Amino acid sequence: MKAATLRTFNTVHTWTGLLAGFALFVAFYAGALTMFHDEIDTWALPKAEAAHDDTMRRAALMLDGIVAAHPAAREQVGVTYPAPKAPSQQVTAYWLDSDGWKTQTLAQSAPHDAEDHEHGLADFVYELHYDLGIPEIGIYVMGIVSVIYGLALLTGLLIHLPHLVRDLFALRPGHNLKRLWQDAHNVIGILSLPFHIVFAVTGALLCLTTVALLAFNTVAFDGKLMGAFDRMTSALPSTQDKGGTAAMLSPAELGARARRAAMGAGAADFEPDYMRYVHYGHRGAAAEVRGTSTKTLGEYGMVALDAVDGHVLRVQVSGARDANHATYSAIFGLHFGTFGNVSLRWLYFILGLAGAFLFYSGNLLYIESRRKRRQADQPLKVRAMATATVGICIGTCLAISAAFVANVLGPLVGSEPTAFVQPVFFIVLAGAVVWTFLRRPARAAVDLLFATALASAAVGVLDITLHGDRLLRSLAEGRYGVLGVDLVAIAMGVGFGWLGLATRKRVRDGDPCSVWYGRDRTTFTDDVRVV
């Protein structure tokens, strides 16, 4: 490869990494935690009660009331099934009204806007993963970031392809800190490259599907693509409202029939989590039951049934899918690692943390490559990047741990845990960025790492102390996820503490001509200015 070409690839790789790095750090760190969404959800809501036997009967009555009060819901109204492993997932109805999507739970007497809800801890961490907690546009931002991320992967591969084997086994600790960071960055990037390609491609597809559909719908499909896409991603055939009135089978009955149909078509199992009616209460009404199966790459499937007599109209589950549904379902399975057992989830968890390190180390390499070797005062771009890296990256870790702590302590002041999760995260993150700016990156990094260590360890210690009785009941019932959250939080606290000690040593004994040196500098040569 020519030197000029290599320099171009290096420049593109550096700037694409910088442009996408901060968002990707948040997405990967939160995504690692999201691999245990249900366990975190159970941990976060210790007082949540299991669904009662009559929950879905009450859901059917709620749907009757919604359609009577909101006629627009008759065209299409959906309802979730209770999820024993995720207490925050209440039985909730969704429908499109004249002024947008509405939602209503069993505990509510009136609907509200679908986006106007409190965030449970597990759901909020998931939102950080796919939209950075930014309403409306966040998912599209992450789609663009995924495209840039893919370009960074491609250029990185081209840079290291000629000496791939040599870089794979090169990890040279010593006094040359930049070389060590470069080696660690390369090794992690090369080893996890196949997974990063999967994440980049599926992330872009998941986040930018709507944008791509709108573009192709206008340019190439003469306005017919949106309807075709709905048919390709749904099990429901074309239906016609025949008017009149008809009694609807309940969500519970339709769910049971859908399970039998799915397993009869070859699925290992089928657990309904959502269903929707079309033409509710009229002759010709149909229902689509969606749910998950195990032992398959694409776990999500759906079964369409007649909502009046319950006969099966169409099945799209593992073993009985067309190419469109198989591809669409596989995208979700590959991105979220839902196609394997707990070992795969742990692998995705480790890959998520390794990915966050990859982007953090990329920023450190940028700083090390551009700092002045014989000058105590560093260029503005170096100081700015160091401030942003510490404030945003380490600040995100601290803010997420603080949100976990707030979830534990919230009920002690008489509030629901969900009331604190989102505000605490953004307040702590903003505080971390301000603290880094005022304290300077070197010292702030030590402060924030120790604070994150304390907050992370406090998550497990506080939960065991305050909810010990719940923990014992969970263990007696064979549910170890709650204890797992506590133990992982304590382990991460130990890890952040170790990073804090290593960072403090660098601040005290590192190169004085660096933004990471935190002691008072003295003039030791004519080339080093006192600061």
Image (cartoon, helix red, strand yellow):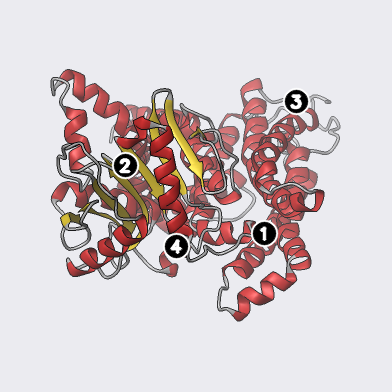
Distance in Å between CA atoms under marks 3 and 4: 53 Å
Q: Is residue 298 above or below residue 394?
A: below
Q: Residue at x 86, y 35 (%)?
A: 520
Classify 310 as above or below 203.
below
Callout in the foreground (3, 4): 4
Q: Secondary structure at mark 4?
A: helix
* Marks 3 & 2, CB-CB < 8 Å contact: no
Q: Amino acid at mark 2?
A: Val
Residue at image mark 4: 345
Q: The residue under label 1 is which amino acid type?
A: Gly
Other-residue count near label 2 (Cα within 10 Å), few / some / many at <14 / 14–19 / ≥20: some
Q: Amino acid at mark 4?
A: Arg
Give whichever of discs 2 and 1 has the lower sequence position: 2
Quick one: SS at disc 1? helix
Q: Mark 2 falls on what kind of element?
A: helix
**Contact? badges 4 and 2 (CB < 8 Å):** no
Front label number (2 vs 1): 2
Q: Which residue matches tag 3?
A: 527
Disc number for residue 12 = none
Residue occupying image coordinates x 68% and y 70%: 470
Q: Which mark is residue 495?
A: 1
Residue at x 17%, y 28% (from the top left corner): 225
Q: Locate residue 144: give its quadrant.
A: top left
Give the Cα distance between marks 1 and 4: 20 Å
Quarter of the picture holding the N terminus: top left
The amino acid on which the numbered mark 3 sits, given as a three-letter code, is Asp
Q: Which residue is mark 2?
A: 201
Of pointers 3 and 2, the one earlier in the residue sequence: 2
In the image, which is nearer the foreground, mark 4 or mark 2?
4
Q: Nearer the viewer, mark 3 or mark 2?
A: 2
Contact? badges 2 and 1 (CB < 8 Å): no
Q: Position of residue 97 (x, y in %)?
A: 39, 28
